Image (cartoon, grey):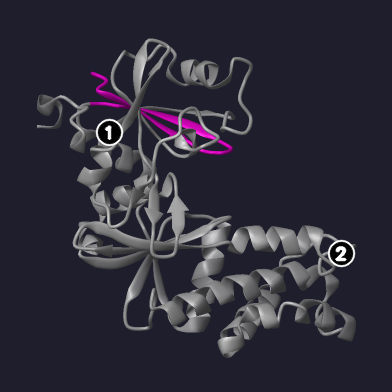
């Protein structure tokens, strides 16, 4: 089949490459361990050449941290509200091993302020597969830095970052709460206890309850092996408490969540405790988003998509 586009999802820790046919179907995938923090000898050009080796000379579109200040070439952020067409019209290009590489800009919400890189392409991928959410909806992208994205009339109107994953790592690895603890054992009851504690923390928030992880352990009502699950529940629960307080989520509507696996399962369990509905978005959001942005930018021959 004819190759019409190569897409790159190039983050801090990974580099994924997609080869597309003329209808946007992924013909071949590659995964390389060359995020911008751990490049091979030869740096960005060497990683790029490996990612596209022996693939046809077609347009290449990349999203993610490759366009950050620490990436190959810094691409300015676009302020929200932003549409797919506006993203496509703001691509930055560079010469890469004789090919033209197009870089997708990240987004900035000036009202907070807040920024994202890579997630904007995931959001576009959701809109391609679930266009009904584009009119009025909210997306949750869990992770080290969770993103809550507001959508109105086909535009990304704003977003907020909650550093839930990073805070969990800091508390369990570098604080007195996690010091000298034995290896964690899965304890769903401890997780649910943490979620409930966050939910019931009121205006004070879960930060006022974090030290309870140590107090409960010292009292003997929380096993040392369950502290991590309790803290996970407390932090994810507080993220949902924040979402409700900020109006990003409520009991009368559903939130679409981008992602899969154990972390997303935890959000689903926590949402149930809050009486919220979270639905998982379709898979392959980044690859779909890259194709949609490329089409809007005119990088794909018109006859290819007909």
Q: Is residue 6 magenta?
A: yes
Disc 1: which residue: 25
The answer to whether any part of residue 284 appears in the image is no
Q: Position of residue 26 (x, y in %)?
A: 32, 31
Residue 179, by quadrant, is: bottom right
**On the rendered image, what quadrant is the N terminus found in?**
top left
Taking 221 as reference, is 124 left or right? left
Residue 253 percent location from the top left of the image:
32, 77
Where residue 46 appears, as percent x and y from the top left, is 54, 16
Q: Compared with residue 15, is residue 44 higher up or lower down, i.e. above or below?
A: above
61 relative to 235 in the view: left or right: left
Q: Which residue is mark 2?
A: 181
Q: Is 36 placed above or below 180 here? A: above
Q: What residue appears at the point 69 percent right and 82 percent down from the top-left corner?
A: 208
User: Looking at the image, which residue is at 72% across and 77% down?
Assistant: 210
- The picture quadrant where one finds residue 250 is bottom left
Q: Residue at x 39, y 64 (%)?
A: 111
Q: Crowding near pointer 1: few (<14 within 10 Å), some, many (20+)?
A: some
Point out the stretch of residues depicted in magenta: 1-21
């Amino acid at each position: 089949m004819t190759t019409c586009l190569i897409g790159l999802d190039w983050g801090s820790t990974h580099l994924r490459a997609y080869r597309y046919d003329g209808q946007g179907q992924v013909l071949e995938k590659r995964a390389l361990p060359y995020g911008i923090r751990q490049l091979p000898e030869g740096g960005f050009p060497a990683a790029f050449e490996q990612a596209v080796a022996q693939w046809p000379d077609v347009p290449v579109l990349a999203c993610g941290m490759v366009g950050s200040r620490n990436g190959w070439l810094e691409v300015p952020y676009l302020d929200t509200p932003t549409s797919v067409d506006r993203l496509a019209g703001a691509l930055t290009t560079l010469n890469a091993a004789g090919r033209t590489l197009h870089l997708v800009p990240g987004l900035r919400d000036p009202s907070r302020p807040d920024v994202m890189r890579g997630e904007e392409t995931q959001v576009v991928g959701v809109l391609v597969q679930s266009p009904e959410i584009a009119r009025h909806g909210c997306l949750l992208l869990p992770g080290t830095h969770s993103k809550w994205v507001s959508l109105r009339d086909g535009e990304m109107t704003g977003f907020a970052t909650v550093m839930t994953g990073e805070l969990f790592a800091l508390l369990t690895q570098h604080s007195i709460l996690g010091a000298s603890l034995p290896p964690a054992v899965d304890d769903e009851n401890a997780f649910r206890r943490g979620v409930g504690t966050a939910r019931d923390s009121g205006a004070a928030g879960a930060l006022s309850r974090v030290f309870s992880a140590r107090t409960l352990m010292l009292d003997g009502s929380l096993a040392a092996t369950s502290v991590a699950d309790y803290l996970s529940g407390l932090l994810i629960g507080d993220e949902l408490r924040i979402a409700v307080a900020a109006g990003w989520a409520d009991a009368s509507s559903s939130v679409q969540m981008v992602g899969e696996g154990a972390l997303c399962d935890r959000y689903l369990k926590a949402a149930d405790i809050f009486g919220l509905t979270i639905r998982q978005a379709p898979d392959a959001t980044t690859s779909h988003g890259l194709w949609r942005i490329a089409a809007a930018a005119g990088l794909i021959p018109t006859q290819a998509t007909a």
